[in-house]
Amino acid sequence: MTRLAGGLIDRSRVLNFTFNGRSYAGHPGDTLASALLANGVRLMGRSFKYHRPRGVVAAGSEEPNALVTLRDGARAEPNTRATGVELFEGLTARSQNHVGPLGFDMLAVNDLLSPFFAAGFYYKTFMWPRAFWEKLYEPAIRRAAGLGALSMQADPDAYEKGFLHCDLLVIGAGPAGLAAALTAARAGARVILADEDFRLGGRLLAESHLLNEAPARQWVAGLEAEFASLPNLRVMRRTTVWGAFDHGVYGAVERVSDHLPTPGEAPRQTLWRITAKRAVLAAGATERHIPFAMNDRPGIMLAGALRAYANRWAACPAKRVAIFTNNDDGHRTALDLAAKGVEIAGVIDPRPDAKPLGPYPVYAGSVVTDTRGRLGLSAIAVTREGQTQWLDAGALGVSGGWNPNVHLASHQRGRPVWDDAQQAFLPGAGIPGQIVAGAAAGKGSTHAALHSGAEAARAALQDLGLTAHLPDLPRAEDGAAPPHPIWHVPGKKRAWVDFQNDVTVKDIKLAHQENLRPVEHLKRWTTLGMATDQGKTANVTAIAVMAELTGQSIAQTGTTIYRPPYTPVSLAVLGGGDTGAHFRPRRLTPSHSWAKAQGAVFVEVGPWLRAQYFPRPGETHWRQAVDREVLATRAGVGLCDVTTLGKVDVQGADAGIFLDRLYANAMASLKVGMVRYGLMLREDGHAYDDGTCARLAEDHYIVTTTTAQAGPVYRHMEFARQCLWPELDVQLISTTDAWAQVSVAGPHARKLLERVVDGFDLSNAAFPFMGCAALTVCGGLRARLFRISFSGELAYELAVPARYGAALMARLVEVGKDLGATPYGTEALGVLRIEKGHAAGNELNGQTTAQMLGMGRMVSAKKDAIGTVMTRREGLMAETRVLVGLQPVDAAQPVTAGAHLFTEGAAQGTATDQGWISSACYSPHLGSMIGLGFLADGAARMGEVILAANPLQRQEVRLRVTSPHFIDPEGGRLRD
Amino acid sequence: MRFSALRVFQQALTGHKGWGPLWRNPDPQPAYDYVIVGGGGHGLATAYYLANTFRQARIAVLERGWLGQGNIGRNTTIIRSNYLLPGNEPFYEFSMKLWEGLEQEFNFNAMVSQRGIVNLIHTDAQRDAYRRRGNAMLLAGADAELLDRDQVRAMIPFLNFDNARFPIKGGLLQRRAGTARHDGVAWGYARGADRAGVDLIQNCEVTGFRIEAGLIRGLETSRGYIGAGKVGVAVAGMTGRVMAMAGMRMPIESHVLQAFVSEGLKPTIPGVITFGAGHFYVSQSDKGGLVFGGDIDGYNSYAQRGNLPVVEDVAEGGMALMPMIGRARLLRIWGGIMDMSMDGSPIIDRTPVEGLYLNAGWCYGGFKATPASGYAFAHLLATDRPHDTAQAYRLDRFARGHVIDEKGMGATPNLH
Amino acid sequence: MLIPHPLLGLRDAQEFTYLGDARLLDRPDGLAPDAAEAFADYVYLRDNPAGLHRELWFHEQGDRSWLVVTRDTVTHEILGAELARDVALARRSK
């Protein structure tokens, strides 16, 4: 056991957990990493490429090595940083990326072959023979790559999304963030304080510093009490602000239940979209290491992490520890560890004048040049002026200085700026509304962090017109000398820069040698910084090494781009709860409950769920139901809920002029009480949408759109009204949801309607084809009636307020029993309209023109309607494909939508393609399948036999070209 | 130096001392016969084919930053030739055939991997449209297969078949589609061009064109004036800015497309999958990251970064389609500038300025087109005739009404 | 992004649908002799600036106003928003 005294763990309780199946115990307050270290476990994983044994390097979210698969079964969570996992009772974790036991990974053979696996080697080989890439090389590479594995089961937990608004968002609850939150909250501002840790305090928790001569945790405890009393302050622990977006929007994830064995009723995580008027970024700093030969063994850690484990978690990986540092901060680790009774083998400090700050040996002017220990560090080589000696040590803390965490100040592509004095990249142009404070701004001493945090909050509030007073801040240490610039220790062996992706100093040298010198080339050639830590501990060091090689300054070398997220975010929480059946809202028609009671089968139509057909007992195939519905409609009367068609109410003195400009054909001339088919074009002259215009009064039209385009067409109409012709007196409102509309079609349609209308004369003379009227039905229910037909039969569409939709359907079926009133669904609707030759979505696909649809003459050249000018372009005029009907020569043969049309005997290829079949169905009326399609010169080819090629399904069918109107081409039935 | 397994072996034994630079860093010459503006995928490929296939000389590529810094370096690496329209499909199939021999040709492993693409079908109308498209592909000499629901399930069992808002009814499969390592493509072409004598000039920004009497003479750059016989512009999202220097307005808007990669995972997803009812497509890189994307953000942007609503929308699509990816983590989001054309299809053509040629309008689909785009543009530059498969990519097709509108969305670039 | 709706204050851009360059307000006269050329320019050509851009957004999940928003396409900073109807009417009175 390597548990020390003290720490912020609750020793009164024991938490049991397993790692690779072995049982261990820890305490509340532990992370998985601290508990493993306290149990003497140093080896926690394997590296990505060479499968090198690895232990934990850091104590926070920058951890590159200690990645585990947490939990089991469907909750298994690969690539989880052991440093961020709060210990809970029953926790299970497994190491990753090895074949065989962690201690004896078969793939460690890659390490022996490492000379062959230099940066970019795979771009230079595996090319011969060509077929071997997919069959042999790539599968082997893919199996070896990756880290953890997904369970392949659906995530069983719940996720939530939420929106928060505040005056000031404080990111990070270390000394700077705490001071900022305190300052702003006391001033009465709405403040959110978010930190990824489960405890407030940040780095204060990891240090032995005193605040006002007392342990820092006492000051933090006092603040927490005050925070709890401030209703205008929301403290969000376990919350990572991971992205800074436009206009003060921040993405944050709260790990609501990740510290519990299971979430229970709560969500596992919540995605917060925080809209902040101002923000203080107090994200702290990340320590950097100094690459030296064989610097990746378990037990070699960042010095500040070693100190954090000792102070906060009372854990230490070894009894005898060495430190390698180029700055005074490293010495603090030695001091703190010594104070906890850990033996200090020595502090190796390249500064020739380095002095001990306490009772430990210092090796001044020295560097670490090699290490030993297969699965964990056993000794280090210390070299001074060419003289090397070996020191026994089970752990080595390395400190190369600190990199400010500038990520969230750089998410809008402002690059950080190199500061020579501090030897660090500091925030650059930053993000509007955001102030960087504390160590993230290079103000790394506790004193400086506290004061810069308070000042940042004061300035941010002042910007908002609020006055904040700087609080009394505790006395704190204020010593932070910049590090001595030493970026790596030269040597023959490998020295790791990016631990997880196994990028070494040699790889950087090779990139330089091969002229991949810009940092982005360096990154992409070597995969530097592309691991799960996005190079938090590696990138700046690598930039410095490349700068050294090119002779440019670090400032000239520059950084790669900082991109969200700050730390990886689960896809489940980004998706929120909108998954499975809840992926998109589902719209139900007014008659849905009625249709459901009739046993209808439903189908997704855009956002809608519509009745597809109404099977009856004994019908074993959908076609039986559809054929029956079609025949019943053509012979008697059919009923279909057509509410999903868009409806727009158009009113105003200029309504007619307005519609004249919207539709290709004339609308102003429409008589009151009449309906006209309307074709809308896009401004580029292609067909946009079709529907009907009904004129209820001089200044009142009702327009219908297709189901699919109801939203876009309404938007388009508002565009025309507000942006193109604002001077017209016209108002629009969408009434799609307000009116239920039922199609009543078939020779008995009039007879049926006569039984529900309230004394309305439905005779052909009084209410002719294309008539419309407002009336009442069923004894006083207000309604609208349109005599329009999509089926080719005598037909009406009856609209009633939406809440009566189901009742109307039920009533019509009931009173029409003797007439054979039959409800039909979208399938029969489709068959009826194909038989009649009406275009629908498959024909109005955005690529067709009025001319192609056989409606070229509808486009009036006399008026300036949307799309008419561009209709006359040469390319559109030259288009000869037009809508035709298609019937198989052999009635038993299929007609398949999506088949391409060819002249019989012609070669089949792109150049000889003559068109395609857009819609097809079985026509019970004709006793064969039929289709609609677009055929070159189609109008002149009636009766010709052509070939429909469907090579995708190895089908070739001879079809006869016909009129698209298979039913009643003269339209007599409509007008009866 | 020619790359090979033997060479890697030899170098490994001798400490990798023998590897030379992948390309030189030449200073610009006073004048070139051909200047390609833009050192991205299309520009580098153009220079490569101009020098190697069309045997032209005195060629330079001007890149304002580092080679491959544009969309070739930030995309979702998908290659496919599954287009509908006759203006497009033969071109993309030509590109696919070039991909199939690319690595052997330019002696660089760009990890072209034909693991297939499945476009999922959720409605009968979508099946009709995909059948038409699949047939168009076969008629153009490409490969395509129509899968029913059971076949999709056998191939990709982890999709949401049981609780989906939009049930999966089948798929259109192109087996020869897949992915390639995007940077590797840029580097392969760059190295191949350099070896054929092309000057690749980095950190050289074009600041103006010298045009006399309607004829191009050369370019003003941040590294001085460079004379040019012919100038080919291949700058994707920057097309509007660059062509404005020649006094032209373009049928193009620049939009941001975000793309995403997860942490590395053991092999999970075999090929490329596109969700037909949500805005989501995904593949898995050889390194193990799930590489995915969705719609463009939808507003004009040169920022190379996007916003949270689209991030959420894409993740929703992913979770709806593949609920087993929930515990994978998003590692990185990036954004590129898309040259969204007015019909969703590209332009490879001359311009009203004699000697100035344009390659643009790739929307978010330029990566797969890289080989054919370079080849066709080089063909045009060298012969002044469009390549057979690129004849429809005319700049004047908008005014003349010969648009190539795969999606049927009209002149609304953010909907293509 | 947040859009400063002139009537409703700051609204999340997610409530809006984007169309494009506000020059789409300036629809040419379809009956003019040069209509073919004018429409080819109007429908297809764009300035596509890197910098300030006046553009049309529709408050689809809100009050259904079309807005002209002035936004920097490089930084995404929004400098203001007006009702498109007002802008269109003002242009007519000129």
Image: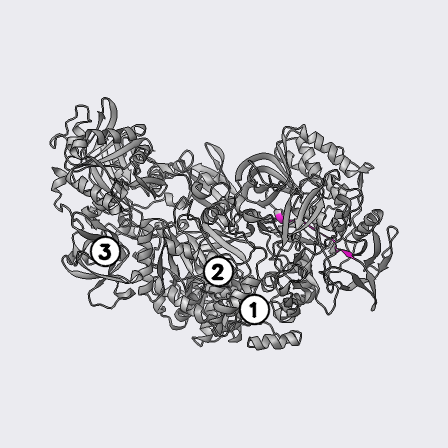
User: In whole angstroms, how far apart are the C-alphas of marks 1 and 2?
Assistant: 17 Å
Residue that mark 1 sits on: A122
Examine the structure image and report whether residue A406 is included in the region drawn in magenta: yes
Q: Position of residue A631 (x, y in %)?
A: 18, 42
Q: Write down the region rendered in magenta.
A: A394-407
Residue that mark 2 sits on: B77
Among numbered discs 3 and 1, the one appearing first in the sequence = 1
Q: Examine the rendering and report whether any part of residue A500 can be seen.
A: yes
Q: Nearer the viewer, residue B351 or A695?
A: A695
Mark 2 is surrounded, within 10 Å at the Cα level, by few (under 14), some (14 to 19) or many (20 or more) other residues, namely: many
Q: Residue at x 29, y 28 (%)?
A: A804
Of circles 2 and 3, the one toward us is 3
In the image, what residue type sits under mark 2? Thr
Q: Residue at x 31, y 61 (%)?
A: A952
Residue at far front of view: A618
Examine the structure image and report whether residue A482 is included in the region drawn in magenta: no
User: In whole angstroms, how far apart are the C-alphas of marks 2 and 3?
Assistant: 38 Å
Chain letter of the residue beneath label 3 in the structure image = A
In the image, what residue type sits under mark 3? Val
Q: Position of residue B6 (x, y in %)?
A: 58, 77
Identify the mark at residue B232; answer none if there is no mark: none
Disc 3 is placed on an element classified as: loop
Disc 1 is placed on an element classified as: helix
Pointers 2 and 3 in contact (C-beta within 8 Å): no
User: In whole angstroms, how far apart are the C-alphas of marks 3 and 1?
Assistant: 51 Å
Mark 3 is surrounded, within 10 Å at the Cα level, by few (under 14), some (14 to 19) or many (20 or more) other residues, namely: many
A510 lies left or right of B164: right
Above or below residue A776? Residue B214 is below
Residue that mark 3 sits on: A895
Q: Position of residue A466 (x, y in %)?
A: 64, 31
In the image, what residue type sits under mark 1? Tyr
Q: Nearer the viewer, residue A340 or A673?
A: A340
